Image (cartoon, rainbow, N blue to C red):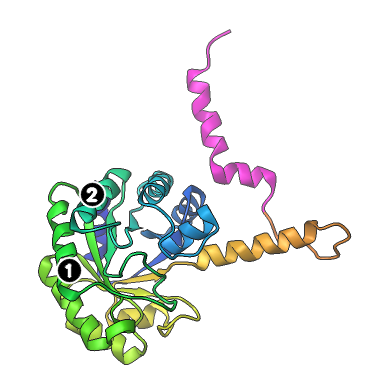
Amino acid sequence: MTPAQRLRELLAQPTIEVMPGCYDGLSARLAAAAGFKVMFMSGFAVSASRLGLPDTGLISFTEMVDTLRNCCAAAGQIPVIGDGDTGYGNALNVQRTVVEYARAGAACVMIEDQVSPKKCGHTKGKQVIPREEARMKIRAAVDARGDADILIMARTDARAVHGFDEALARCKDFEAEGADIIFFEAPETEDEMRRYCAAMKKPCMANMVPGGKTPVLSPAKLQEVGYKLALYPVMLLSSSITAIQATLEALKPNSNAAPPPAISFTELQSVVGFPDYWSRETKYKALE
């Protein structure tokens, strides 16, 4: 079964799926080991972890595909949705993005309607391309899907720029073009979240960012509202930063700070796969 097929099966289930935001092979491996059934490669988290820079369009298509390939390999059988940003150009660039994300192993690619260079969905300064151009990009993505086994998630950031009604109209356009999942970014009230989900026939995704523009609801509440996927894009990254900062503080000369809890070196070896490697290594060991 392909990653796209596994994701389609999940979307056909009646319950909501919680998605952690991965950003490298290790975070994807940990999410899979924890039992999550789907994960999302977050552009915010990849830009932060790979470049140490903000999610403002600075990271390249090549860097994103390379990271995606690592995430998909480490995730094993767990489908990964890849953040495709704006598609890295016009409609034809979008088509290449769709095909290359599929080749990298993604189950789904997200394409958004921001002006390039894009901004994180819950930060200031966003702009969106004209509605008809956004629709053509999703049409191009859906057409490219015919040559690649991958789902298309269509995202609009128009709420912050043109208001709720325009953003909802774009979602309806994307649905009409054949997108598999619809993502209305940053609704500002629970009522807006309900109106959006009620208007859609395709699965909807919620983006839960503490301190962002959208109310943070529990997965059970999100399911009741009408969402199919609940994304937590930066939770793993944020907790990792907290642990790293505390560890660095404890390492400083003359520091009285206690280091945070950590796994043993033996456990670390297990997490990254040494025992499995050693087991398989014996199969090809030359006889002495």
Q: Residue at x 67, y 52 (%)?
A: 263
Residue 102 drawn in magenta: no
- Where residue 119 sits in the image (x, y, percent)? 40, 70
Tell me where residue 163 sits by quadrant. Answer: bottom left
The secondary structure type at the circle numbered 2 is helix
Instruction: Indicate the quadrant where residue 181 lies.
Output: bottom left
Number of dots carrying numbers:
2
Q: Main secondary structure of the magenta part?
A: helix
Q: Which residue is mark 2?
A: 96
Q: Check residue 267 for magenta coloring.
A: yes
Helix, strand or loop at mark 1: helix
Q: Residue 193, image x and y in percent?
A: 30, 85
Q: Would you say 17 lies left or right of 58 here?
A: left
Comparing labels 1 and 2, the label whose residue is closer to the camera = 1
Residue in view at x 33 percent, y 65 percent = 116
Neighbour tally class for label 1: few under 14, some 14-19, many 20 plus, Cα within 10 Å: some
Magenta residues span: 263-288
Cα–Cα gap, marks 1 and 2:
17 Å
87 in relation to 156, above or below: above
Measuring from the top left, give residue 7's x and y in whole percent: 27, 58
The quarter of the image holding the C terminus is top right
Amino acid carrying label 1: it is Glu
Q: Amino acid at mark 2?
A: Arg
| Horizontal side of residue 106 vs 131, given as left or right | right
